[in-house]
Amino acid sequence: MGILDKLKKTLKKTSESILTAIAGKKIDENFYQEIEDTLIRADVGVQTSMMLAKKLADKKFPRDASEAEIKKFLEGEMTSLLKPYEADLFELTGKNPEIILVIGVNGNGKTTSIAKMANAFKQKGHNPLLIAADTFRAAAVEQLKYWGNQLDIEVFHGKDQADAAGVVYSGIEKAKSENKDIVIVDTAGRMQNRNDLIAELDKIKRVIKKIDETAPHKTVLVLDGLTGQTAHLQVESFLNKVGIDGLIVTKLDSTAKGGVVISLTQKYKSPIFAIGIGEGVDDLQSFSASQYVKAILGE
Ligand SMILES: Nc1nc2c(ncn2[C@@H]2O[C@H](COP(=O)(O)OP(=O)(O)OP(=O)(O)O)[C@@H](O)[C@H]2O)c(=O)[nH]1
Ligand SMILES: [Mg+2]
């Protein structure tokens, strides 16, 4: 299956709900209101949904305008909203090693996304090292080791309950001595309101900067696409407290609210590094605005 087909399948629930508002409808006042409500329900965001509905209304389509015309107009508008937020997770700064710090709330998909991206780096000819800095739970280290074994990618971990920042420091030193060109740091899931855990992230960042003051080269916040407004609160908090360079939004395969990528980018101006579209190792896609919009409009 091609990339776009897979994305369409992933976002089918979202596109089906949007299309019911468009298909076979007469273009009247109700029509615009229904489009607006539908976009809001798909988590496109209230302001953006109102703006898109208004732009449609201003366009003064004839009453019998076709579904294809409406979709084409929405497609153009939505694509230009998202285009500035395309970011390439795999574009490197040229630093050796390139250090990627992955953060986010429990269960959002950090460890799984790390496995997926590490595998993609490996396939591109890189030699990644994964650091298990989730020293909170033994099972977390095991999960990363499991992926490392599956993918034949080295995982560095410390002793149980070791200091996370210390593990990160030793891991990066090891990467340097073994010529690993990419380091990906998995961190413990933390609620944005747990100040002690946020402080630990700060410490991890400081330790990384001791080795390379330009690092981490990417700080990636992983969000669960199913969580809607909660995901918004998480971005707000991590942006303020830790600083992030961009987002990975996961689990888009199981939501009817795929518009969340639009609302997040419009509100927080955060680039999208990638999207998670399933549990398998190949289910991480680079984010393309035009393909994403095509998929949520079922094109
Ligand atoms: N359907 C689907 N499931 C996903 C996706 N990404 C992750 N998951 C699942 O979400 C669950 C949690 O993923 P993890 O990678 O363990 O999440 P985490 O952020 O590392 O969690 P903690 O280590 O507890 O903080 C797992 O069952 C994953 O398989 C995705 O894109 N789609
Ligand atoms: Mg994890």
Image (tube, rainbow, N blue to C red):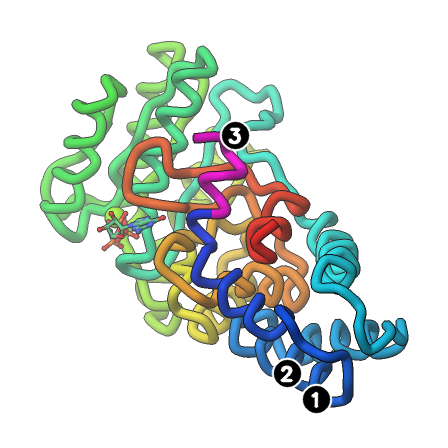
Residue under pointer 2: 34
- Between 65 and 122, the residue placed more toward the observer is 65
Overall secondary structure of the magenta section:
helix
Mark with earlier residue (2, 3): 2
Q: Residue at x 44, y 66 (%)?
A: 256
The amino acid type of the residue labelled 3 equals: Asp
Q: Residue at x 78, y 60 (%)?
A: 69
Question: Residue 283: where, in percent of width, then height?
Answer: 37, 38
With 224 as the anchor, is 147 left or right in this view? left
Q: Nearer the viewer, mark 3 or mark 1?
A: 1
**Residue 294 within the segment the image draws in magenta:** no
- Residue range corresponding to the magenta coloring: 1-8
Question: Residue 77: where, in percent of width, then height?
Answer: 78, 59
Residue under pointer 1: 30
Element under disc 2: helix
When asked about the image quadrant of residue 43, the answer is bottom right
The amino acid type of the residue labelled 1 equals: Asn
- Between 216 and 221, the residue placed more toward the observer is 221
